[in-house]
Amino acid sequence: MPHLFFQSFWHIIGKDVVEAIQSFSYSGKMLKAINETIISLIPKVDFPINLAQFRPIALCNTLYKIISKFLVNRLKPFLNLCISENQSAFLPGRQILDNVTIAHECMHFLKNKNKGKTSFLALKLDMAKAYNRIEWSFLATIMNKMGFNSIWIYWIMTCVSSVSFSFILNGSKVGYVKPNRGIRQRDPLSPIFCAEGFSSLLNHAGREKQITGLKIYREGPNISYMFYVDDSIIFCKASSQEVRKVMQIIHKYKAATGQLVNLEKSSVFIRINTSPEIKRDICSNLRNVHCVTQGTYLGLPMVITKSKNQIFGVVRDRIKSKILD
């Protein structure tokens, strides 16, 4: 039922709702019906002709949303201590524009700095269906490694693993699917732990001097990666050794999580002073990753050129399209 029903009839059902939520916090058990989720297919284009042209939207039960939200709200004061500072998604005090600004500064440095012996690169990764492939065992292991109490792990894993899906087709509810991995994109719990395993592997490689992050100036911070949910950029030296280490980390992360990194849709931007021989060697190690001089990050251009009208024309067109719709 929609949240409006609960608001309108709270004077009648409010006590029962509170008791249901409290029952979950005491026992850690959830009624099957609470986590039943309906998938609605929203067309991406005006006249869709196949499933790829629809966007699936998960419609969660209101009671489940309340349970999920109260868990997230209790976690929020501590999330900045748990989650890497390079991950800016859905955390208090961290904004998406922080990543955009830092990305622009780093890419400007790579594009214009043509002096010095050391070359760097930026590897932008495309995570295919970032939430759908996460292994539940990986989530439990990550929370355990982060020091979560067993009851907290049980609460969150109950929320994740008790889900079932049905579909709305032609106005009717059909089908039943019980998944064994993945988390819902619109679930408030979804974004929090997805990239932490990846962060841990990259941080360890940085501490062991296996990956060298980007420094824009001598006293500045060392930036080796930036995450915003499934939008990832990795910075390292433009050398075969460091690129191979990055690829090893990506493969290890894929094996542990079930996540799929779509290398065909990923791209690499190599600093301008890098020799052609090194560029060819790097591209060979990155296999299907495309070498580019321009790209987008979080919907905005990664490199700002002289023609601002040309660069930001896409953004302007998107805004116009939204207004007209």
Image (cartoon, helix red, strand yellow):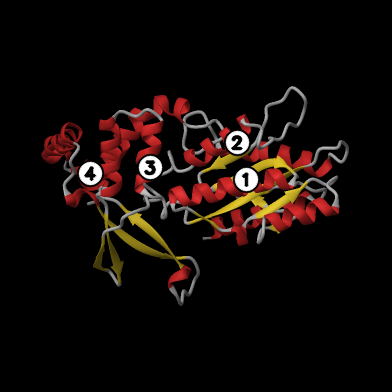
Q: Amino acid at mark 2?
A: Ala
Pointer 1 with pointer 2, Cβ within 8 A: yes
Q: Which residue is mark 4?
A: 63
Locate residue 8: give its quadrant: top left
Residue 98 picture location, percent across and down:
61, 35
Which one is closest to the eye, mark 3 or mark 1? 1
Residue 146 falls left or right of residue 100? left
Locate residue 234: give its quadrant: top right
Going from N to C along the chain, the mark reached first, 3 or 2, is: 3
User: From mark 2 to mark 4, how far is it between C-alphas?
Assistant: 42 Å
Residue 139: assigned label: 3
Pointer 3 with pointer 2, Cβ within 8 A: no
User: From mark 4 to mark 1, how far is it between C-alphas?
Assistant: 42 Å
Residue 95 picture location, percent across and down:
55, 35
SS for callout 4: helix
Going from N to C along the chain, the mark reached first, 4 or 1, is: 4
Going from N to C along the chain, the mark reached first, 1 or 2, is: 2
Pointer 3 with pointer 4, Cβ within 8 A: no
Q: At 43% from the left edge and 39% from the top edge, which residue is drawn?
A: 193
Going from N to C along the chain, the mark reached first, 3 or 1, is: 3
